[in-house]
């Protein structure tokens, strides 16, 4: 899911000539009239997950490439919540029987708030 969302965002941010689906109504330079940062936020720890590490590296490489996301965002940050895997839970089906069914999401929100503050 994460990779698909990232690919979709990359495609929309990159300026492609002669297509109607990639910000044709607003030039890439027009997107720079405001300031915005991009945060890549992982609930656990990047270094403990090869897929997460490779994904963030790919995104960072694209950001800094010629014509990459740096045209759309000022800065990019890769941050992590360091939630232990066994506590990184989001199980909506268990919300009636497991009190910590949403623990991962809650801890990630709390960590993100503290980091970005």
Image (cartoon, grey):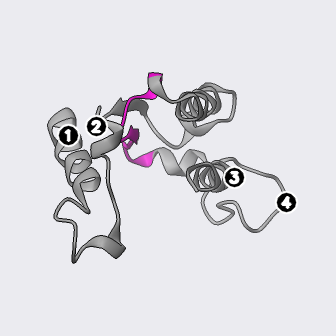
User: In the image, which is nearer the foreground, mark 1 or mark 3?
Assistant: 1
Frontmost residue, 11 versus 87: 87
The kind of secondary structure element at disc 1 is helix
- Identity of the residue drawn at 38% across and 40% down: 41
For the residues labelled 2 and 1, say whether their Cβ atoms are less than 8 Å apart.
yes
Q: Look at mark 1 in the image and give the residue it sits on.
A: 111
* Mark with earlier residue (4, 3): 3
In the rendered image, which quarter contains the C terminus?
Answer: top left
Name the disc covering residue 83, or none: 2
* Mark with earlier residue (4, 2): 4
Does residue 77 appear to the left or right of 112 in the view shown? right
Residue 108: percent from the left, percent from the top? Answer: 26, 46
Frontmost residue, 47 versus 68: 47
Report the magenta residues as a range.
33-47
- Identity of the residue drawn at 28% across and 51% down: 104
Farthest-out residue, right: 18
Q: Look at mark 3 in the image and give the residue it sits on.
A: 11
* Mark with earlier residue (2, 1): 2
User: In the image, which is nearer the foreground, mark 4 or mark 3?
Assistant: 3
For the residues labelled 4 and 2, say whether their Cβ atoms are less than 8 Å apart.
no
Does residue 15 appear to the left or right of 99 in the view shown? right
Disc 1 residue crowd, few under 14, some 14–19, many 20+, Cα 10 Å? some
For the residues labelled 2 and 3, say whether their Cβ atoms are less than 8 Å apart.
no
* Mark with earlier residue (1, 4): 4
Frontmost residue, 8 versus 83: 83
Q: CA distance from mark 4 to mark 2?
A: 45 Å
The kind of secondary structure element at disc 2 is loop
């Amino acid at each position: 899911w994460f990779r698909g969302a990232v690919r979709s965002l990359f495609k929309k941010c990159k300026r492609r000539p002669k297509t109607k689906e990639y910000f044709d109504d607003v030039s890439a330079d027009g997107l720079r009239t405001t300031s915005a940062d991009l945060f890549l936020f992982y609930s656990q720890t990047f270094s403990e997950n090869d897929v997460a590490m490779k994904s963030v590296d790919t995104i960072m490489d694209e950001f800094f490439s010629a014509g990459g996301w740096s045209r759309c965002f000022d800065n990019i940050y890769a941050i992590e919540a360091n939630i232990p895997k066994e506590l990184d839970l989001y199980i909506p089906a268990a919300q009636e029987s497991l009190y910590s069914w949403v623990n991962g999401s809650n801890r990630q929100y709390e960590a993100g708030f503290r980091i970005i503050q």
